[in-house]
Amino acid sequence: MYLLVVVINDESNLHEILDTFYEDDIGGATVIDSMGMGHLMAEQISIFARFADLTGDSGKFNKTIFTLVENREKLDQAVAALEEIVGDFEEPDTGMWFSLPVEQAKGINSKFNARKD
């Protein structure tokens, strides 16, 4: 099992990502508002606030998606879907994603609760 964490800068992609995950049987995602360090600094430190005023990004939230995927195949499927929707995450202002192996979890869908050693 893997935890997939995705931060997208353009929240207009959110519903398409969640719809695609649902269609691909990757469910149970949690979505939160998040803000990068640069945006937070722009709000707190006046010199950075000037840059935010120029770009119009002051106070802009990203969307962070957390979801568990059953196996490596589903993880690869989810990442391919993300990049089809969002584009190349190596491009500026798209976002980021990372995955982590999960050994144990509780309080989630029962299909994940059986340990597979």
Image (tube, rainbow, N blue to C red):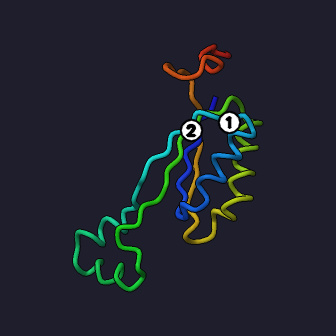
Say what secondary structure mark 2 lies in: loop
Give x and y (percent) for residue 33.
Answer: 42, 52
Say what secondary structure mark 1 lies in: loop
**Which residue reaches farthest bottom?**
54
How many callouts does the rendering have?
2
Decide: is 61 above or below 81.
below
State the image quarter where residue 54 is shown.
Answer: bottom left
Decide: is 63 above or below 65.
below
Give x and y (percent) for residue 49.
Answer: 29, 78
* Residue density around tag 2, few if under 14, some if 14–19, many if 20 or more, within 10 Å: some
Residue at the spot x=58%, y=48% of the render?
98
State the image quarter where residue 108 is shown.
Answer: top right
Task: Judge left or right: residue 54 versus residue 20.
Answer: left
Give x and y (percent) for residue 91.
Answer: 63, 70
Q: Name the residue under label 2.
A: 29
* Residue density around tag 1, few if under 14, some if 14–19, many if 20 or more, within 10 Å: some
Residue type at numbered disc 1: Ile
Which corner quadrant holds the C terminus?
Answer: top right
Residue type at numbered disc 2: Ala
As drawn, the label of residue 41 is none
Residue at the spot x=71%, y=46% of the render?
20
Residue at the spot x=70%, y=49% of the render?
79
Decide: is 88 above or below 98.
below
Residue at the spot x=22%, y=78% of the render?
46
Which corner quadrant holds the N terminus?
Answer: top right
Q: Name the residue under label 1.
A: 26
Q: Distance between the residues labelled 1 and 2?
A: 8 Å
Give x and y (percent) for residue 42.
Answer: 30, 72
Is the C-beta separation of discs 1 and 2 under 8 Å?
A: yes
| Depth check, front residue: 80 or 110 | 110
